[in-house]
Image (tube, helix red, strand yellow):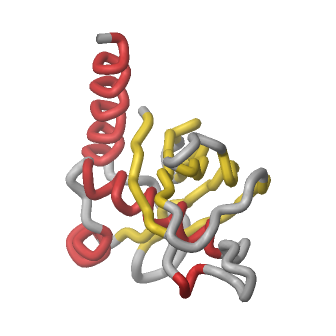
Amino acid sequence: MTFDWPVRVYYEDTDAAGVVFYANYLRFMERGRTEWLRALGYEQDLLRDEQGILFAVRRVGLEYRVSALFNDLLLVRSAVKHLGGASIEFEQSILRQADGKECCRGTVNVVCLDARTKRPRRMPSEMVDGILSGMERSARDSKG
């Protein structure tokens, strides 16, 4: 399942040379994952309040390739690489929409936590089923 989310580079995202500050790519990726969850019908504040779960980044690996600049329109592409009982491994990339060049790519592993104890916890089975259904729908849609 691939999910795309557009992001515009604002002045606040850049350094003095007008180049996106390297840590801001992580912020863009976070937005992509949040919007992916939202598209599946899951709001993170409701997951915390109603299901008692949170998601936290456990591990990140990034490769920077081409700089993004002030006012560029980017596309954050997110795909589930592995779905575990208490974690999700994402492959994410950030593309410049003007020329399709890849600015950054990497893997992000998020873990499901109990909102109260902050300890790892299995995702609710209905959520896992929803993610799997979304992945299957995406696979069918991409085959035409």
Provide residue 144's location: percent of width, then percent of height.
29, 11
Which residue sits at x=37%, y=21%?
A: 139
Q: Position of residue 130 (x, y in %)?
A: 27, 40
Residue 42 in the image: above or below residue 9: above
Q: Is residue 92 left or right of residue 30?
A: right
At 69% from the left edge and 73% from the top edge, which residue is drawn?
19
The part of the image, by quadrant, that contains residue 33 is bottom left
Q: Is residue 100 above or below residue 15?
A: above
**Residue 69 visible in the displayed image:** yes
Where on the picture, by quarter, is residue 11? Answer: bottom right
Q: Where is the N terminus found, in terms of image quarters?
A: top left
Residue occupying image coordinates x 40% and y 77%: 115
Q: Position of residue 34 (x, y in %)?
A: 39, 62
x and y percentages locating residue 14 in the rendered image: 64, 80
Left-right relation of 14 to 122: right
Q: Residue furthest top?
A: 144
For the point 66% across and 73% down, which residue is it?
A: 20
Q: Is residue 129 above or below residue 44?
A: above
Q: Nearer the viewer, residue 55 or 36?
A: 36
Residue 59: quadrant of the picture:
bottom right
Judge whether residue 89 can be spotted in this image.
no
